[in-house]
Image (cartoon, helix red, strand yellow):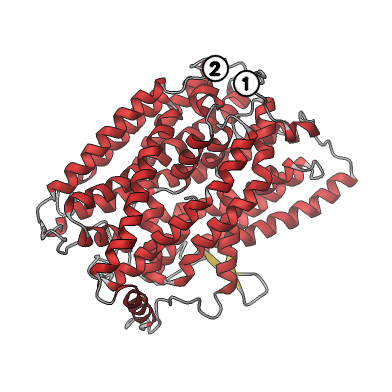
Amino acid sequence: MAIHAALAHTALTHTAVATHAAIGHASGTGTVLAAASGKAINRTELGVVIFFFVAVAVLGFLAARWRRSGVDRKHLDEWGLGGRSFGGFVTWFLLGGDLYTAYTFVAVPAALFGAGALSFFAVPYTILVWPLVFIFLPRLWSVSRKHGYVTPADFVKGRHGSRSLSLAVAITGIVATMPYIALQLVGIQACLDVIGIGGNGSTFAKDLPLFIAFAVLAAYTYTSGLRAPALIAFVKDTLIYLTVIVAIVYIPTRIPGGWSHIFDAAQTRLTTPNPKTGKPAGSILLAHGNTLPYATLAIGSAMALFMYPHAQVGVLATKSRNTVRRNLAALTAYSLMLGLIALLGYMAIAAHFTTATLNGNAQHAVPALLDWAFPSWFTGVAFSAIAIGALVPAAIMSIAAANLFTRNVWVDFIRPQASAHEQTQVSQLVSLLVKFGALAFVLGLDATSAINFQLLGGVLILQTFPAIVFGLYTRYFHRWALLLGWASGIGYGALVAWWQTSPTQHHFGSQVAQIPWTHQKAYIAVTALVVNLVVLLVTNVVLRAVRAPAGDDSTSAEDYEHEERQGEPSAEPVVA
């Protein structure tokens, strides 16, 4: 899910963040899974994970021939948007697989494990997002289908007549997406640590599974494009739903006192003052003074989610406007699932896991809980769900970032005469670079640094909201005013995020900060958006007053209500 670095930050701010040491405790089958202590690898869990990985790899390569449309297979519409042919069933799994990632499975409960109720903003945020995007995403689909836009930056250029503004949106999307791909590895690493791969072993041996996973991911994404994650999403979502339902029903039976004790134990642990700081970590209820941070985290995250390019890819790949609307309504089922996933954090507390037993890494809370509660074979199924849950969004994110580079950097500024086939080739190559760049990124930095960059990405991506969403309804705002507002929000948000400190970090220590000239705190991305809007409004008045050139609008009012009827030919995809 899109802004879960903020979730992890909530947990990590309240717990000492260590290296990815493995967890040492006894599993339900008696196998000790503590690679840090030199214990044996759980071969059953590893075998199940390998089985599912091989299965989805085969599906990824077979996807190249799945549901072929009439679009030239070497065209960017075919490779990067699945021929714009996905129906309701496929789209539901694709968007769910894209937005509810492996890191969601790990980070949401880890945040509740570390800080309690404040981290629960992820649930209302995913409740808010669907009615919000139901309003404007069908309009984006319609105008993009009519004009053959592949990326949101394509739309910005067509609507506002500004390559500079389009480039700003594209670069922001790429920068925000890159660390998000890297962060998917955190979920995989946590599972591998619990299985017993890592710890005192060599760095090469510990990281080899990640290299293999990303190499296979890169190969089938290069071959099959968006069709690969669309097909694999069926497996991923089925495994995650199975794991969550079984966990919610079964784990409380393993904990004496059941659900009542789970919440009591969580409240007792979270409200106990830390011996070093003298302050409690949190509470299962929202503490005084956290109302505004909680509300702005939920609202800001909801507004930002579909500004991420990978989220919009799933929408643009659908075959009709009604498909978009039906799916945005049906995807609320994932919000219910997320609420259940979040409760795993409290279950980990009731199962007597502490930051000490997790070697200071709250990200291990869910894998450790699953390993403790289930027999090895089912734990392997659960870990497979998390691992596949990383590969699906990583593939979509790399495709989205590659599309942005190709359409809005390569074509607009380097090779305007690039053919449709050349654009596809460039996107395929860039998608490879993005994946291995993200792999190098996360292997070269610790988890805290990766989360820091993703936190900053969430702040940055929200600043594209005015250019995209306002543009879907009006041309009132001048292109230069939108660009100046974007730059102001980016600058303010980046600086304020950098200035935040915590007991364990000198920078990026929190996702909330004090609002200037007040005693209240709010989500940094939201306050940065306010700065963005103030600059936008002021400069817009000035630019309109001096009649600065507004740029050409290549769209018309009816384009935003366009619905392609069966048998009606699609708009010719834009080449340059």
Above or below for 252 versus 50: below
Read off the residue under disc 2: 71
- 428 left or right of 150 in image: left
Amino acid marked by disc 1: Pro
In the image, 63 versus 259, the foreground residue is 259
Q: Which quadrant, please, contains the C terminus?
A: top right
User: Is residue 233 visible to the viewer in this orientation of the structure?
Assistant: yes
In the image, 194 versus 345, the foreground residue is 345
User: Is residue 365 visible to the viewer in this orientation of the structure?
Assistant: no
Earlier in the chain: of badge 1 and badge 2, it is 2
Instruction: Verify CB contact (< 8 Å) between mark 1 and mark 2.
Output: yes
Based on the displayed image, in which of its 4 quarters is residue 346 positioned? Answer: bottom left
Residue 68: x percent and y percent? 47, 20
Read off the residue under disc 1: 573
- Tell me how far mark 1 sits from mark 2, CA to CA: 9 Å
Above or below for 315 versus 2: above
- 572 left or right of 201 in image: right
Question: Who's the residue at 39% across and 52% down the image?
Answer: 103
Q: Residues within 10 Å of mark 2 (few under 14, many from 20)?
A: some
Residue 470: x percent and y percent? 73, 46
Q: Residues within 10 Å of mark 1 (few under 14, many from 20)?
A: some
Residue 179: x percent and y percent? 44, 46
Q: Nearer the viewer, mark 1 or mark 2?
A: 2
Question: Who's the residue at 75% across and 31% down the image?
Answer: 559
Q: Which mark is residue 72?
A: none
- 330 left or right of 12 in image: right
Residue 537: x percent and y percent? 79, 53
Based on the displayed image, in which of its 4 quarters is residue 509 positioned? Answer: bottom left
Question: Who's the residue at 26% across and 58% down the image?
Answer: 370
